[in-house]
Amino acid sequence: MGTNRRTFLKQSLASSSLLISAGVLESCAKPVAEEKPSEKFKPLILSTWNHGMPANDRAWEVLNATGNLVDAVEEGVKVTELDLENLSVGLQGLPDREGIATLDASIMAGDGRCGSVAFVRQIKHPISLARKVMDLTPHVMLAGEGARQFAIAQGFPLEPEVLSPKAAELYKEWKVKSEYKPVINIENHDTIGMIALGPDGKLAGSCTTSGLAYKMHGRVGDSPIIGAGLYVDDEVGAATATGLGESIIRICGSFLIVELMRQGRSPQEACEEAVRRLIAKNSANIKDIQAGFLAINKDGEYGAFAVHPGFNFARHQQGGKDLIDSKSSFTKNG
Ligand code: SD4
């Protein structure tokens, strides 16, 4: 090495060490609190409807115990899947027209991993089956008999196909007229969708339902369709949906909301725009359609909006939890 080069290197090293020590001195002079992930991102868990409260409780517990957000959103909605009072989620939910309970569920992590199951029978925890699809298969979605076979292979017990006493009673009443008439906000619309921001700034979500009561056998709603009932992207945020699945699928509701947030809308603005589009695409019978959206962005801002009044959601964050009424496009008087 020539003298010049050696001198240059020496000078560079000297000046860079000066810079380093200047940096160190500067940071000593202005102590910056070490940015622990949990201080930068405040965990937040949101879930649709009243049953979101116990589901969020469980998700919060799992997140605190394990730090695993995907486990948290899976375990959280499992509470609802077992809730015998809930007639829209889990095997106790209202059946299809043939009297069979068929379930839809999806789960997604903000890095793009996702899994779902649709039109699946006899499985107590479809969300866990969706998780297995995500973790163990090269696929995103398994449906019907294939999903059930996969469940058996994974050691899920098959539950007997017996309706819960409440569902059996209501189904018997329904059979008298066998009319399919969605009733806004009552029993038909109680899917749980959960979206969460973890202390490391990562996002995840889950969604599980027995779908619309007295649907045609084989009908699949929005909940297991990635982009319709659920969408999560660590770069932007997450969204989930509840309500008449067909209306939500028509606008790719959850994906639309995440993309609107990517373009700069707040979660609230994005949910409102999604509802506006949903109304535009379903205007003929909008008075019979309820749908609600829930969204969160990576900064921990959130929003919700529905077509009609009555939609609410559960919020868990550091220092508290509450149930919040969503605003809606139509008011009680139309
Ligand atoms: C579906 N979106 O299957 C579901 C139903 C629902 O609250 O959300 N219920 O269309």
Image (cartoon, grey):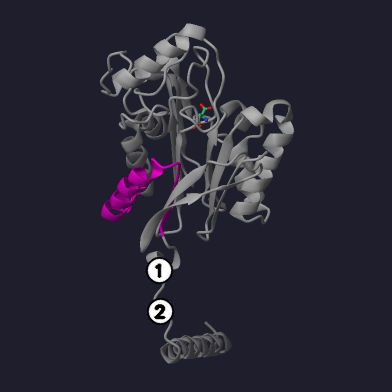
**Residue neighbourhood size for the residue with mark 1, other residues' Cα within 10 Å, grouped as few (<14), some (14–19), many (≥20):** few
SS category of the residue bearing label 2: loop
SS category of the residue bearing label 1: helix
- Magenta span of residues: 43-68
Residue 72 position, x and y percent, is: 34, 46
Amino acid on which disc 1 is placed: Glu
**Residue neighbourhood size for the residue with mark 2, other residues' Cα within 10 Å, grouped as few (<14), some (14–19), many (≥20):** few
**In this rendering, would 168 be left or right of 245?**
left
- Asked if residue 24 shows in the view, the reply is yes
**In this rendering, would 161 be left or right of 22?**
left
Do labels 1 and 2 touch, CB within 8 Å? yes
* In the image, residue 267 lies in the stretch drawn in magenta: no
CA distance separating discs 1 and 2 = 9 Å
Q: Residue drawn 47% across and 7% down?
A: 176
Disc ID at residue 33: 2
* 112 vs 157: above or below: below
Q: Residue drawn 67% across and 35% down?
A: 278
Q: Which residue is mark 1?
A: 39
* 97 vs 220: above or below: above
**In this rendering, would 24 be left or right of 164?**
right
